[in-house]
Image: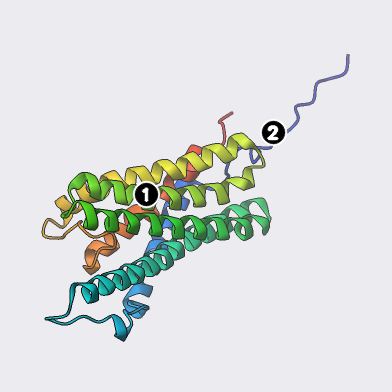
Amino acid sequence: MEPQVNQPVDRGVGALLICPWTSFVLGLVAAAIVWCALQVVHPIFLVPQKYHAAMGDSPEVFAANRRAQDGVERAHAMLYVGGLGLLLAGLIGAREGMLRRSWFVPVIAVPLGAAGGALGGLLGCLVYEYLRAHVGQADLIHTVAAQFLLGAPLGLGVGLGVGLATHTMGGLFKSAFGGLAAGALAAALYPIVVSIVLPAASTDALFPAELSNRGLWLAILGGLIGLLVPLAARPKKG
């Protein structure tokens, strides 16, 4: 009888190789880069002069001004959240690619992460535009809903992009689910954490205006996505 030879198991099939805590740190790095960049470039887009409104102008003028402001806010949200998705997918994908010795991972992950972030920025803005037109002052549930619609596509895009490295539908699903769960968790935690850490800060706006609040918002998003995407698709032990 011939002796049995144990074949090595490829732990990279169906799972991500990156350590969740390494990915968590990379998520915080991506958030910090976006936070620093915003201090330099924001605002990039401005309301055109022809849409400026002054005291005594007609309601039509103010309505046109509001529409122009909405367009500016949409453009900023899509650019900034898309940039966060690009960096998250790029950094996590690059590390995963290094472990697999493949440049394919970040090349595919980056556009998906950026697209997910841009979509999330757009959806979040649309929620606030609807609230402004039909509800008025946003409540906590509205804040969570808007943050979920921002974070879910962002996390899903990063999860899908990085998850393609697993080469299996199961691994792709787990990675995508981890990103989706991270976006949902960030939406729920953000107003709670702000109320404890920065009690004077406001969570009414989709894109926080205060520097400390903005940094906390980015850190929660980046850190949770960085942690949960590889955690959901981690290799099996044994």
Q: CA distance from mark 1 to mark 2?
A: 39 Å
Residue 197 figure quarter: bottom left
Residues 149 and 100: in front is 149
Residue for badge 2: 9
In the displayed structure, does residue 140 sit left or right of residue 120? Answer: left
In this view, the residue in front, 195 or 73, is 73
Type of amino acid under label 2: Val
Q: Is residue 236 above or below residue 64?
A: above
Pointer 1: what residue? 149
- The 10 Å Cα crowd at callout 1, few under 14, some 14 to 19, many 20 or more, is many
| Outermost residue toward the bottom in this view | 49
Identify which residue is drawn at 48% across, 39% down: 177
Q: Is residue 130 above or below residue 170?
A: below
Kindly identify the residue that appears in the image at 39 percent across and 45 percent down: 182
Secondary-structure class at tag 1: helix
The amino acid type, in three-letter code, at marker 1 is Leu
Query: Image check: 238 left or right of 47?
Result: right
The residue at the far top in this view is: 1
- Residue at 12% in and 55% down: 199
